[in-house]
Image: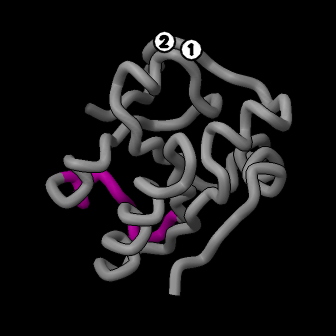
Amino acid sequence: MISMISVAELHTVASGDQGVVIDVRNADEFTSGHVPGARLIPLPTVPLRTSDFDHGDVHYIICESGARSFQASQYLTQQGFDVRNVEGGMSAWRAQGHPLETGMTSNLLT
């Protein structure tokens, strides 16, 4: 079973540094606007990048609508990671008026 979180809940969590936000969209989507502080790990690279995940962290997985993040969440859950799939993804994040960061960030993982 995949744990879910709303964008409103994610906004609260992300504001308090209570986990790691992982964006599984493509780089061009990420640079056009993402959750502040999110790390980029595109969906096709997730199985190759499990060493970038810490078993002690909660990982909030987001994409544009929730489909790619659900796939990533399924895989990471099977690998024993603590993950939450963000319902509605960046579409819901933007619709609710939460802050966006654009461009590449210093905590970018590629």
Whether residue 4 is in magenta: the answer is no
Left-right relation of 15 to 26:
right
Q: In which quarter of the image is residue 34?
A: top right
Left-right relation of 94 to 51:
right
Residue in front for this viewpoint, 4 or 52: 4
Q: In this view, does 64 lie above or below 105?
A: below
Left-right relation of 91 to 11:
left
Residue in front for this viewpoint, 46 or 19: 46
Residue 67 percent coordinates (x, y) = 47, 57
Identify the residue at image location x=60%, y=77%: 3
User: Crowding near pointer 1: few (<14 within 10 Å), some, many (20+)?
Assistant: few
Amino acid type at mark 2: Gly
Residue 70 percent coordinates (x, y) = 46, 64
Main SS class of the magenta portion in the image: loop
Q: In this view, does 91 lie above or below 80?
A: above
**Magenta-drawn segment:** 49-57
Indicate the secondary structure of the residue bearing disc 2: loop
Residue 103, labelled with which disc?
Answer: 2
Q: Quadrant of the C terminus?
A: top left
Q: Are marks 2 and 1 in contact (CB under 8 Å)?
A: yes
Q: Name the residue under label 1.
A: 102
Residue 23, labelled with which disc?
Answer: none
Identify the residue at image location x=66%, y=52%: 88
Left-right relation of 66 to 13:
left
Identify the residue at image location x=30%, y=49%: 43
Q: Is residue 59 above or below residue 17?
A: below
Residue in front for this viewpoint, 94 or 54: 94
Amino acid type at mark 1: Thr
